[in-house]
């Protein structure tokens, strides 16, 4: 699993990522964890589930949770557009690898980020919680956010009892 | 079992051998004189040693060698099988298992070997009547031919001949009549046969022992040397007639070939790793889903040939799914067999005599169910041995046999399998359960509670009636875990107990976890599946009745009050109720609850898919399934919904 809390920069190649747009920001995921990019499809809401992963989709006969990072990054919910996509990734949370779909307003490209351009998330000046971000990377005058997916999803897989009301 | 890694193959083989050895030993514990069992255990140990050494498990080979030698002495009659010896070899088998897995402490092995030596010495003092060799024969004429691949399998003909020579004065002549022409000769095969005349006071068993490991596949005739009684010339043809052989060994002669043919029949089986079956099951599930989409398409169109192909595929997919289900079925005996050892150990730990009787072992259940049933059953049996079983003298005083009998039985009833654990012990002390429940605040002092409800309390978390915590049970974890596990298998558990006469615990488990019959319903815009097994009836809830019952959520159903849940509210659909809402009454055991839905869509046979770990905390759903149009429907977890409808739970949730 090429996913680490601290990105696994390689000296020559940097980090190969897939960038996508969500709520006006640009996010990046390690290309190695991306399994597939899907067009939007009918989703099934899971009543009582956490807003981060409130629905499921049928991904080739498997039930895959669909996660929306907007809430975790303080963004407004947004209707799907023609550019909306689902990025299916394989993530290892607490030693359990499983598939998650991520909604994206638009998928940009596979590119390479360099360690020299990376900075730790600043303590002030961010709208969202600091531990949701692994680092920020400057790229072509813009900032690319590397979200900390394991931290975001580990909260849901913990055994804390939550029942629907 | 992957063909690439011989060590993994050996581990599987070793696991099976140890299983056989263990079962053999447990049988032997009951029938100490049975030479068949002794031989079976010896063979198992010998094979384990041989293959262990071959695959580089030297520690295992060395350790097993000692046990094998001990058993060899039993087999030869020097030492008699004793309960002590059986029990030492059982713990040795555990150690061997650890050696196979590579995590055995060496000191442990030495301790077992010391105990083994003691047990063998103690047993050697007892004469061994069974093994008394049958004398009086002047000698034997044998003629034998090894299987062609014997040498490839590691049998040395010369060693066999040497062993024969050790038995007595032997005249051995090789025969070459089966020798092929040079062009056809495979130098690795054994084409030579031997005729041998053995003179001396030798038992038939001694001769057969020489060929113990090749007997199944070889041709051999053993005839007594015709000197005294003419009638014995054709003994080889009818070995049971041989007057010289005394009791048990006759049976041995008689049974060996039959056991061998049974072994061969098993050889026809193909061993497949469980994951591959699971993968196949997934594919079949997807096929069934794709097929139902196809038949929808075909149904809408007017293309007759498409429709006929679609029907053909529907039939095939259905048959394939049925076959797949059968493939995954394993007999319950694989589960029950593991409890013989548990009972043996429990009897030792508690010092009480316990007898296990099993019934209906051929009942077949999905392998996943079998695997997940083991732990709950262990809990139940340990608990019942610890709490329920009286001391032998108390049992006799109560007019029962000294041995406590526990009965495990399985039988199939419709789509369910019923597993019952019955004992004739003390039973569950309902008064103690009540006292404990009152102390824990589960019920009010003096509250009127039916006996069934009281018994149900033993599954409450943190409940234990054992006055003190023992090694076996009493820690208050267990029975609630048992109940949860059984419910996660979509099963139910039921306890009956008669004080002083024993108790019966019945588990009802669906035959398979992969597929359920479900009732497809619509709530708001979402579609959900209710397991049909839990559905008792469907009623209409008219709008006015709905309004009238606001605030109390209880309907009267044949003079019984049934609480109901409005799934629309529970799932916060935010939609208006349909004019004609329906109540689906579901129940497990004695508890029932009505679920208010907007529409009942129909019956739906579904392949169950697990929910993602991200939704582990959403209690209301047991899984999900994919509908004909490719969308996902969630499967309701009835036990959880019932728990939610309980007033006690409501208070707890409101407080939390």
Image (cartoon, coloured by chain):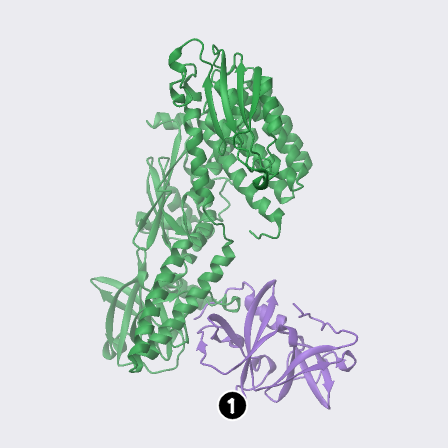
* Residue beneath disc 1: A82
Kindly indicate the quadrant of the structure image that contains residue B568: bottom left
Q: How many marks?
A: 1
x, y percent for residue B446: 33, 49
Horizontal relation, residue B489 to residue B532: left or right:
right
Q: Is residue B622 shown to the viewer in this render?
A: no
**At 36% from the left edge and 72% from the top edge, which residue is drawn?**
B292
x, y percent for residue B253: 44, 25
Kindly indicate the quadrant of the structure image that contains residue A160: bottom right
Relative height, residue B428 to residue B639 (above, below): above
Q: For the view shown, which residue lies furthest in the top direction?
A: B228
The chain shown in purple is which? Answer: A
At numbered mark 1, what does the secondary structure look like: helix, strand or loop? loop
Horizontal relation, residue B183 to residue B234: left or right:
right
Relative height, residue B465 to residue B528 (above, below): above
The chain shown in green is which? Answer: B
Relative height, residue B148 to residue B399 (above, below): below
Horizontal relation, residue A3 to residue B255: left or right:
right
**At 56% from the left edge and 64% from the top edge, which residue is drawn?**
A158
Residue placed most toward the observer, B597 or B622:
B622
Horizontal relation, residue B125 to residue B288: left or right:
right
Q: Is residue B408 shown to the viewer in this render?
A: yes
x, y percent for residue B42: 54, 29
Residue placed most toward the observer, B611 or B142:
B142
x, y percent for residue B225: 47, 14
Local packing at callout 1 (Cα closer than 10 Å; few below 14, some 14-19, many 20+) is few
**At 55% from the left edge and 19% from the top edge, which residue is drawn?**
B79
Task: Indicate the chain on which mark 1 is placed.
Answer: A
């Amino acid at each position: 699993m090429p996913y680490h809390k601290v990105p696994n920069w390689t000296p020559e190649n940097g980090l190969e990522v897939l960038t996508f747009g969500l709520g006006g920001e640009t996010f990046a995921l390690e290309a190695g964890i991306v399994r597939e990019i899907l067009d939007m499809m009918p989703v099934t809401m899971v009543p009582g589930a956490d807003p981060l992963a409130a629905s499921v989709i049928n991904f080739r006969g498997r039930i895959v949770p669909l996660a929306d990072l907007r809430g975790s990054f303080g963004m407004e919910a947004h209707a799907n557009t023609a550019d909306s996509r689902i990025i299916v990734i394989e993530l290892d949370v607490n030693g359990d690898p499983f598939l998650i779909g991520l909604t994206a307003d638009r998928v940009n490209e596979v590119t390479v980020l360099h360690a020299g351009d990376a900075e730790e998330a600043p303590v002030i000046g961010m709208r969202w919680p600091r531990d949701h971000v692994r680092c920020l990377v400057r790229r072509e005058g813009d900032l690319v956010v590397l979200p900390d997916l394991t931290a975001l999803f580990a909260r849901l897989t913990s055994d804390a009892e939550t029942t629907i009301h | 079992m992957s063909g690439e890694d011989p060590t993994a193959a050996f581990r599987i083989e070793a696991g099976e051998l140890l299983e056989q050895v263990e079962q053999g030993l447990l049988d032997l514990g009951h029938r100490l004189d049975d030479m068949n069992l002794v031989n079976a255990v010896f063979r198992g140990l010998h094979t384990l040693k041989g293959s262990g050494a071959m695959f580089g498990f030297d520690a295992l080979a060395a350790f097993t060698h000692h046990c094998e030698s001990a058993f060899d002495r039993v087999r030869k009659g020097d030492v008699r099988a004793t309960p002590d010896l059986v029990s030492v070899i059982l713990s040795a088998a555990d150690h061997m298992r650890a050696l196979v897995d590579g995590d055995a402490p060496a000191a442990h092995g030495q301790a077992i070997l010391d105990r083994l030596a003691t047990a063998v010495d103690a047993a050697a003092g007892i004469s061994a009547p069974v093994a008394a060799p049958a004398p009086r024969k002047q000698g034997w004429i044998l003629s034998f031919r090894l299987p062609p691949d014997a040498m490839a399998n590691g049998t040395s003909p010369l060693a066999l001949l040497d062993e024969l020579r050790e038995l007595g004065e032997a005249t051995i002549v090789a025969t070459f009549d089966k020798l092929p022409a040079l062009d056809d000769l495979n130098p690795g095969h054994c084409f030579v046969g031997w005729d041998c005349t053995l003179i001396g006071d030798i038992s038939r068993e001694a001769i057969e022992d020489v060929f113990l490991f090749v007997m199944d596949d070889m041709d051999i005739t053993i005839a007594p040397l015709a000197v005294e009684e003419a009638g014995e010339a054709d003994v080889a043809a009818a070995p049971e007639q041989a007057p010289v052989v005394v009791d048990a060994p006759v049976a041995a002669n008689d049974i060996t070939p039959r056991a061998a043919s049974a072994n061969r029949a098993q050889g026809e089986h193909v061993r497949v790793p469980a994951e591959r079956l699971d993968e196949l099951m997934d594919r079949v599930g997807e096929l069934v889903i794709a097929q139902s989409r196809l038949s929808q398409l075909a149904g809408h169109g007017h293309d007759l040939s498409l429709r006929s192909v679609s029907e053909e595929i529907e039939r095939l997919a259905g048959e394939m799914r049925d076959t797949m289900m059968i493939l995954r079925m394993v007999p319950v005996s694989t589960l029950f067999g593991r409890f013989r050892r548990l009972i043996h150990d429990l009897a030792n730990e508690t010092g009480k005599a316990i007898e296990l009787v099993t019934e209906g072992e051929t009942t077949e259940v999905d392998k996943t169910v079998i695997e997940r049933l083991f732990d709950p059953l262990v809990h139940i049996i340990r608990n019942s041995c610890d709490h329920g079983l009286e001391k032998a003298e108390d049992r006799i005083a109560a007019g029962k046999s000294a041995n406590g009998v526990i009965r495990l039985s399985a039988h199939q009833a419709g789509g369910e399998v019923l597993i019952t654990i019955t004992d004739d012990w003390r039973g569950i002390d309902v008064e103690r359960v009540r006292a404990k429940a009152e102390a824990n605040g589960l019920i009010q002092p003096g509250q009127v509670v039916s006996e069934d409800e009281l018994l149900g309390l033993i599954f409450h978390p943190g409940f234990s009636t054992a006055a003190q915590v023992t090694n076996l049970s009493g820690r208050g974890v267990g029975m609630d875990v048992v109940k949860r596990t059984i419910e996660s298998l979509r099963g139910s558990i039921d306890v009956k107990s008669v004080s002083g006469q024993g108790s019966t615990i019945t588990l009802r488990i669906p035959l398979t976890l992969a597929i359920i019959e479900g009732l497809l319903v619509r709530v708001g815009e979402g579609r959900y599946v209710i397991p049909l097994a839990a559905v008792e009836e469907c009623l209409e809830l008219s709008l006015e009745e709905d309004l009238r019952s606001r605030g109390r959520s209880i309907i009267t159903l044949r003079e019984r009050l049934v609480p109901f849940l409005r799934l629309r509210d529970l799932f916060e659909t935010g939609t208006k109720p349909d004019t004609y809402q329906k109540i689906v009454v579901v129940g497990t055991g004695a508890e029932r609850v009505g679920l208010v839905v907007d529409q009942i869509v129909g019956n739906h046979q579904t392949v169950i898919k697990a929910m993602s770990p991200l939704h582990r905390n959403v209690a209301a759903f047991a899984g999900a399934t994919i509908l004909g149009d490719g969308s996902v429907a969630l499967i309701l977890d009835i036990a959880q919904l019932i728990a939610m409808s309980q007033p006690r739970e409501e208070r707890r949730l409101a407080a939390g």
